[in-house]
Amino acid sequence: MNNVLVLNSGMYAIHIIDWQKAISLIYRGQASVVDEDYRRYNFDEWTELSAMISDSPNGFVHSVNLKVAVPEVIALNFYDRLPDSDVKFTRKNIYHHYVSKCCYCGKRFATPQLNLDHVIPRSKGGTTSWDNIVLSCIPCNTKKANRTPVEAGLKMHYSPSKPKWKPALSLHIKTGVPLRHSWQKFVDVLYWNSELKE
């Protein structure tokens, strides 16, 4: 059994859930199965169609009277919003945001050779936030010590900033589940139709 891509009612990819929750949502009428041609099926229609399917990529759920194919994609019937676009302030996301590069020398390093650095040191009122944390290699971090970059004579190649949310990437990062081929067209819709910021 596999995970299921969830679309909102506007057919935008918003989440990935386990197959048990997907079947439950369809059964309760809160979601519909979506096929590759964007056709929607309620539980009864999907059950009827499942009886005619001999092979399903996600497998089947069997009961005494039913054989139901586990869908690959479902759409919520009443939810038309997109998930919160705020990127969580985690080490993983910080390393991803700065693509493992030192913000002082601009070179890329392996993870163990980088530190999180407070641009304005905590001893001088600096906060632990997107606006004050960058990656620093060990030599640059040692040179900077408990000073600001200006005081240490360091040029910043990358200023501290909060990353912009990327819908398709967000699905992958939040869940740790790689995107499947059958989901790609639904993820692409979100990518191509998302409003760009100046």
Image (cartoon, grey):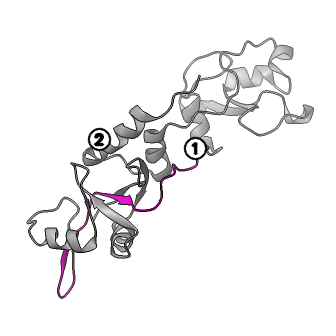
What residue is rendered at 28% in x and 68% in y? 42
Q: Taken as a whole, is the magenta stretch helix, strand or loop?
A: loop
Q: Identify residue for label 2.
A: 185
What residue is rendered at 55% in x and 25% in y? 109
Residue closest to the far right:
124
Q: Is residue 73 left or right of residue 155?
A: left
Question: Whole-percent x and y of residue 119?
Answer: 78, 27
Q: Identify residue for label 1.
A: 85
Crowd class of label 1 (few under 14; some 14 to 19; many from 20; radius 10 Å): few
What residue is rendered at 71% in x and 35% in y? 130
Residue 60 appears in the rendering: no
Examine the structure image and report whether residue 78 is included in the region drawn in magenta: yes
Residue closest to the far bottom:
64
The quarter of the image holding the C terminus is: top right
The quarter of the image holding the N terminus is: bottom left
Going from the N terminus, do you reach mark 2 or mark 1 first? 1
Examine the structure image and report whether residue 131 is included in the region drawn in magenta: no
Crowd class of label 2 (few under 14; some 14 to 19; many from 20; radius 10 Å): few
> Which residues lie in the magenta part?
60-86
